[in-house]
Image (cartoon, rainbow, N blue to C red):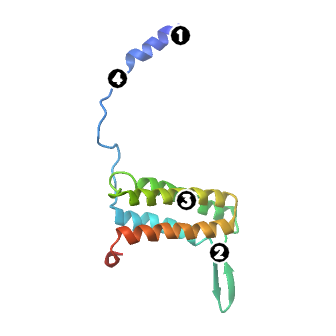
């Protein structure tokens, strides 16, 4: 009986010709992706670490609730996937530097996920600096100063 079921499944398979067109569509151009998605996502991470010092005193930006840490973790996971998105047709730029920087974005973001899950404010602060350096390095190579 099992043999008949397996044979029946094999008879139903259809071979599909591979298509060189990806099954997705870039909805935004890269500049819009940066402005609408990547920058606000990075701001969540940067806004959850460090301190603000004013005349009234010092404010620690470290999350104080599980919800706050979840927001940092979620932003880091989004940023990791955005690094992958930057390597896909529709957003990928020519050159090994682009790929290396996009991979750096993903790698740093994966470490940020871990730091947020451990509620390690010092690691989030330090990795936020690394994330900033990855972003600046990319902007220096791929965005002319007058268009930022």
User: Which residue is depicted at the point 63% across and 60% down?
Assistant: 70
Q: Residue furthest top?
A: 1
- Mark 3 or 4, which is nearer the eye? 3
Nearest to the eye among marks 3 and 1: give it: 3
Determine which of the numbered discs, if any, sits on residue 109 in the image. 3
Give the residue at mark 1: 2
Instruction: State the image coordinates of residue 142 (x, y, percent, origin top left).
Output: 35, 67
Work out whether residue 25 or residue 137 is closer to the camera in this orientation and state it. 137
Q: Residue 54 in the image: x percent, y percent?
A: 64, 89
Return the disc, 2 or 1, that comes first in the chain's sequence: 1
Earlier residue among tags 4 and 1: 1
Q: What is the quadrant of residue 113 in the picture?
A: bottom right
For numbered disc 1, what is the local secondary structure?
A: helix
Nearer the observer, disc 3 or disc 2?
Answer: 3
- Measure the alpha-carbon separation of dots 4 and 1: 21 Å
Q: Position of residue 116 (x, y in %)?
A: 65, 61
Spatial CA span between label 3 and label 2: 19 Å
């Amino acid at each position: 009986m099992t043999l008949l079921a397996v044979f029946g499944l094999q008879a139903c398979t259809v071979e599909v010709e591979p298509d060189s067109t990806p099954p997705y569509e870039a909805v935004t151009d890269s500049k819009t992706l940066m402005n609408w998605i990547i920058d606000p996502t990075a701001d969540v991470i940067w806004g959850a670490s460090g301190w603000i010092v004013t005349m009234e005193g010092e404010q620690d930006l470290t999350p104080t609730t599980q919800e706050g840490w979840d927001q940092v973790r979620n932003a880091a996971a989004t940023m990791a996937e955005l690094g992958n998105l930057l390597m896909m047709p529709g957003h990928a730029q020519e050159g090994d530097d682009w790929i290396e920087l996009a991979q750096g974005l993903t790698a740093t973001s994966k470490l940020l996920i871990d730091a947020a899950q451990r509620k390690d404010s010092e690691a989030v602060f330090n990795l936020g600096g690394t994330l900033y350096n990855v972003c600046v390095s990319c902007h220096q190579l791929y965005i002319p100063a007058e268009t930022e």
